[in-house]
Image (spheres, rainbow, N blue to C red):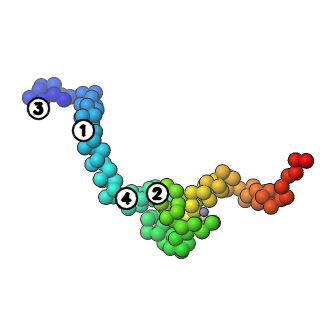
Amino acid sequence: MPTPTSSKTPTKRDRSAYNKQYRAANKERLDAKAKAYRDQNKDARHNYDLVRAYGITAEQYAGLLHRQGGRCAMCGTSAAGCRGKGRLHVDHCHDKGHVRGLLCHACNTGIGLLKHDIALLDRAKAYLKAEPCSLN
Ligand SMILES: [Zn+2]
C-alpha cells in the first residue's frame, strides 16, 4: 500500500494485493485469532446456522432435544454419540421446510438416501424382512 504521504490513492487491486501479502505474512497469528473467535462464539454461530438453515433458534433446538430425551428421534442414540460436531442433525421436510425432529448422522443420512420417500422406506423394510436369497 502506498504510504500516507503518497499522492496516489490505492486502487482496489493495490488493497487486494496488500491484504493477500499481509494475510500470508501473518497467517499463523490470524488463524489463531479466527479459531479463538470461533471457539468463543460457538453458541452464537450455532444459533445463526440454525436460523439460517431451518428457521429455528438454538433455544428451540434445545427444547426439541430435551423433548427427545437428548436422543435421536429414530434410533435413540445419544447426541454425544453423534458424528460431527456432537450434535444431532435437524431433520426437515425439503418440500415444506418444517422441522420434523433431530436425528443422528446415520438416521439422517439413511432416510435422506432413501429420498424421505415412505413408500421406498416401506419397500426397504419389506426387503430386509424377506427371506435371504438362495443362490443354489
Ligand atoms: Zn439415529
Q: Kindly identify which residue carries mark 3.
A: 4
Q: Is residue 13 left or right of residue 129?
A: left
Name the residue rendered at 12%, 25% in the picture: 7
- Whole-angstrom CA distance, mark 3 to mark 4, is 39 Å
Q: In the rendered structure, which disc, 2 or 1, sits on the residue that comes first in sequence?
A: 1
| Mark 2 surroundings: few (<14), some (14-19) or many (≥20) residues within 10 A | few
Q: Nearer the viewer, residue 75 or 65?
A: 75
In the rendered image, which residue does mark 4 sit on? 42
Q: Position of residue 1 (x, y in %)?
A: 19, 29
Separation (CA) of disc 4 from disc 2: 11 Å
Of the pair 40 and 12, the residue shown nearer to us: 40
Instruction: Pinpoint residue 81: horizontal percent, then vertical percent.
Output: 52, 63
Neighbourhood count class around disc 3 (C-alpha, 10 Å): few under 14, some 14–19, many 20 upward: few
Label 3 within 8 A of ligand 1 by Cβ? no
Residue type at mark 2 is: Lys
Circle nearer the N terminus (2, 3):
3
Q: Nearer the viewer, residue 122 or 47?
A: 122
The residue located at (63%, 66%) in the rendering is 74
Q: Which residue is mark 2?
A: 85
First in sequence: mark 4 or mark 2?
Answer: 4
Residue type, mark 4 in image? Lys
Q: To which residue does mark 1 refer?
A: 26
Left or right, 32 with respect to 135, comes to left
